[in-house]
Amino acid sequence: WTELRRELSRGGGNPLAVSAHDGTGLDELRGQLRDALRAAAQPDRVAPEGPMRVHRFDPLERGWQIVREGDGLRVKGWRIETAAARIDFDNEESRDRFQRTLERFGIDAELRRQGATSGTLVRIGRVELEWGEEG
């Protein structure tokens, strides 16, 4: 963040780190928004020149999240949804490889923690799986 802040500040901006998860920077963000709205309301305000750089952060691009959905659980996250879409679930070796991926990412353990048992419907992207226990 220190390096990114320094780089963004070179363009004259005032970068701010914000986390909705733990509340970091929210008070400062509110203050900057309040000041910007007041400044925007001034009739003699001059629009900034040059291109505007917009940065977007998708927390699920690299990570994942499990949410209850109807009668089952849904695993959200770009990487795991992409992996699921590429798997040939008719092939036992592919299914085993995908199971290892779930274990490596920690998704398997979190599904169990959230109550996935034999027969639980688990959705990952467009894929619907019936959770099963190895016997």
Image (cartoon, rainbow, N blue to C red):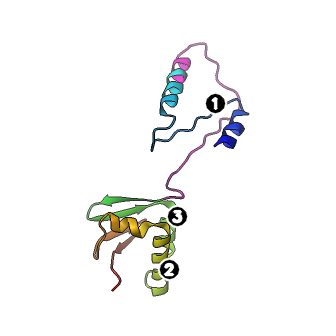
- Which quadrant holds the C terminus? bottom left
Upstream in the sequence, badge 2 or badge 3? 3
| Kind of residue indicated by mark 2 | Arg
**Residue 34's x, y, as percent?**
49, 23
Q: CA distance from mark 1 to mark 3?
A: 32 Å
Mark 1 or mark 3: which is in front? 1
Q: Is 83 placed above or below 31 here?
A: below
Q: Secondary structure at mark 3?
A: helix
Q: Residue at x 51, y 25 (%)?
A: 31
Report the predominant secondary structure element of the magenta stretch: loop
Mark 2 surroundings within 10 Å by alpha-carbon count, few (fewer than 14), some (14 through 19), many (20 or more): few
Residue 74 placed where, x, y %?
A: 37, 63
Q: Quadrant of the N terminus?
A: top right
Which disc is residue 79 wearing?
3
Amino acid type of the residue tagged 1 in the rendering:
Asn
Q: Which residues are magenta?
A: 36-63
Q: Residue at x 29, y 76 (%)?
A: 118
Tag on residue 14? 1
User: Rounded to the nearest whole Å, what is the CA distance between mark 2 and mark 3?
Assistant: 15 Å
- Report which residue position mark 2 lands on: 97
Q: Position of residue 100 (x, y in %)?
A: 48, 76
